[in-house]
Amino acid sequence: MSEKVKCTHCHLEFSKDVMIVDGEHYFCCNGCQGVFHLLSDEGLESFYEKAGGVTLTPPTQQYEDSANFNSLAFYDKFVRTNSDGFCEVSLIIEGIHCSACVWLNEKALHKMDGVIEANINYTNNKATIVWADDVVKLSEIIDMIRAIGYNAFPYDASLQEAHANKERKEYYLKMAVAIFSSMNIMWIAIAQYAGYFSGIAQDMKTIMNIAEWTLATPTLFYSGWVFFRGAYYGIKTKVINMDLLVATGATLTYIYSLYITFRQSGEAYFDSVTMIITFVLIGKFLEVLSKKNAADALDGISQNLPTEVNVIKGENIEAVPLDDVKVGDSVVVSSGEKVLLDGVVTKGCGYFDESSLSGENEPIYKDVSDNVISGTISIDADIHFKVSKDFKNSTLANIISLLESAINKKPKIQQMANRLSEYFSATILLTALFSFIGWYIYSSNFEHSFMIGISVIVIACPCALALATPVATLVGLGLGSKKGVLFKEAAQLENMAKTDILILDKTGTITLGKPEVTECVLYDNFDKDIVYSLVKGSSHPIASGVREYLQKTDPKEIIFDSFKQLPALGIKAFYNGYQIVGGNAKLMQQSGVDISYKSDNTLFFVAINNKIAAVYELQDKIKDGAKELVQNLLKKGIKTVMLTGDHYDAALKVANQVGIDEFLSEQKPQDKSAYILNLHEQGKKVVMVGDGVNDILALAEADIGIAMGSGSDIAVDVGDIVLLNNTLKSLEDAFKISKTTYGLIKQNLLISLLYNGITIPLAIMGYVIPLIAAISMSISSLLVVGNSMRIRIKWDKG
């Protein structure tokens, strides 16, 4: 019988004859061999030591279990196609315990051919994976995750909420035990301290020590289990974390007190053990709640979503699962219901609450032909609307996805703080050791020296440093979502706070984007049907203004032989051998059309066969708050520049109205992009705000591209920040939120560094006992969390 050997990767035993021999290593399949070489190439051979000989599931054996990830039903429900044409899915990675686990999974996935992006959020173990489906299948990605000892399953918000509730209940129970023990142990401690000054018999003292031991034991090993677990996984991945400091300090104090109790000589510190665990546990729980509350603010728009909508099927109305509704279906929404899909009203009218998306409390009136947005609520409307986007591509789904992505991507200042906290814990352990040795050499008093070492360990808290950025960032993102400002990445909070120059498009950004015809001059060759059909084919705001004006004359639509839109210029079409052009003066000049018409208003020219046929004067109202925005930003040292494709006179008029000193007119998309590139070469941080297709190059080139929520889909996709309510007030809010958040981050870092800079030397000098160290450590974390919550107070004060 052939000898059996273990697979080097998964540790399953097979006959040696069927194993793949690779030098000194044996593999049961090509999957295990591939994962082994991946880990080896990245210098991660220690993974197998950390796995501790645990049997893993080999990739080939898991294929049947994961094959359903490739099914059409799974793709329809969980997989979306992003703007670049790649597949994207959200998964929960089971088995992640620390940042090293996150790093290992991301590294393994990035090494796979076809995986474009893999981001894992450590706070909720949620992974966002982007891949090319024609190169690698989702089942293969799942197999890779399982092959390195983890598991993955589709993200389900309701399951995550249930998991969070379960975690909170566990914390409540652990805190109840810890608080009960602490309250009772303090009564015993009071008697001990009274006896310390007035005298107490040793046997009575021993009895009280045993009573304290009885109370301290469940506190340490049950309530404090969360710290032992965190310390264990930290040691496995060779990371010295805050949990290790707490577990070490409490355990050493417990062992020493136990020694004193049975020796029946000296002072026991069981009260310090319970207080260390209780105060730090309460602090940790409050941190969990603060992060959860901040995340809940971001998830508020998606809470309690119904799973079905009412769809018109012939003469009947049927409840259809949300994910099964297709584009073109007719949906019924009654008063008080939430709109779950984007669409166009076909019947009925009424008011809608859009505050969850835009932050504006005033209801919006919707009538036939108006757009309804997913995530809004019907106040008094009973309407029918035709679905324009399925749920996966709806406004609501995209906002939720972008918010989750923002939480995953960390600002540079947070990455720096994380790196500091990684080395901080190791430094503290060494400091505590040297403090103990130094005091013991100096005083020859083991008990005193030991307590000083414990105090140094307990009082030093890297969690305040680690919390400094993420809590403030989450609060900032949550406030932004409430105010209609959607940051696609948390890093943009930091980048926007450092802005030097703001660049604004004119139409649709500074102005309302709905120009109205105020004057019209017609020539002999004017044909209203031709002009109407020309502007009807364009979505540009100026063309839309002319179209609405012509609709009052009951025109007829004709079909052109050819039709083309010219970015930043206008429209060109051919009909029965005639060339028709409509647009600005620059297009007329390029087309050889002689024009002499002048006006301060925006002009739209129409020429047929190189002869002017009509001139329309249009005026677009300035948005509320435009002038105040420019003035307020100038006071903060941010210069505002306007770039527009409109002619000089119209640009000058708007610039004067809002107080912009510098502007450029008749700008093509590549001109705007080149202008921003030149600013980059001067070392300037640039924010660009736009809403149209002609702005996408500039939005992409800027350090931060901000898209108006009512703008084109491609502009919203390219922008780093989206202003959902389409107002300049929300743009000012975006600057205020970013600057306030960044300021609070720096304050939090200063608080944590000052705390450690003051308390650690005090502990080293012997002025702090373990009990006070535990209390002060918890206070430092709560100071950081509390300071972050001040963002709302600072916001209200301006």
Image (cartoon, rainbow, N blue to C red):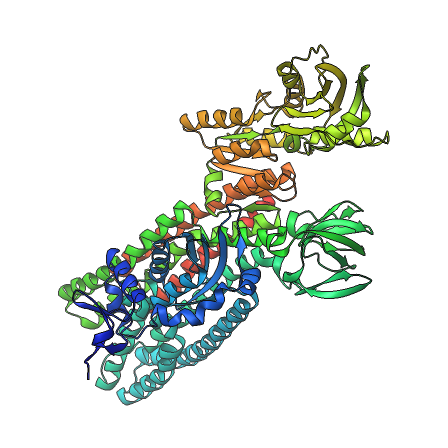
Residue drawn 63% across the image and 17% down it: 586
Residue 728 appears left or right of 248: right
Residue drawn 61% across the image and 34% down it: 692
Q: Nearer the viewer, residue 702 or 696?
A: 696
Q: Quadrant of residue 548?
A: top right
Residue 36 pos. (x, y %)? 26, 63
Looking at the rendering, in which quadrant would you find the C terminus?
A: top right
Q: Quadrant of residue 15?
A: bottom left
Residue 362 appears left or right of 13: right
Judge whether 223 appears above or below 330 on screen: below
Residue 260 pos. (x, y %)? 24, 81
Q: Nearer the viewer, residue 338 or 332?
A: 332
Residue 159 pos. (x, y %)? 54, 69
Judge whether 676 appears above or below 482 on screen: above
How many numbered marks, from 0 up?
0
Residue 686 appears left or right of 341: left
Residue 570 pos. (x, y %)? 65, 25
Query: In the displayed image of the protein, which residue is found farthest to the front?
Result: 576
Q: Is residue 240 something one can see in this rendering?
A: no
Q: Nearer the viewer, residue 606 or 445?
A: 606
Looking at the rendering, in which quadrant would you find the N terminus?
A: bottom left
Q: Nearer the viewer, residue 420 or 515?
A: 515
Residue drawn 69% across the image and 10% down it: 594
Q: Quadrant of residue 595?
A: top right
Q: Is residue 35 something one can see in this rendering?
A: yes
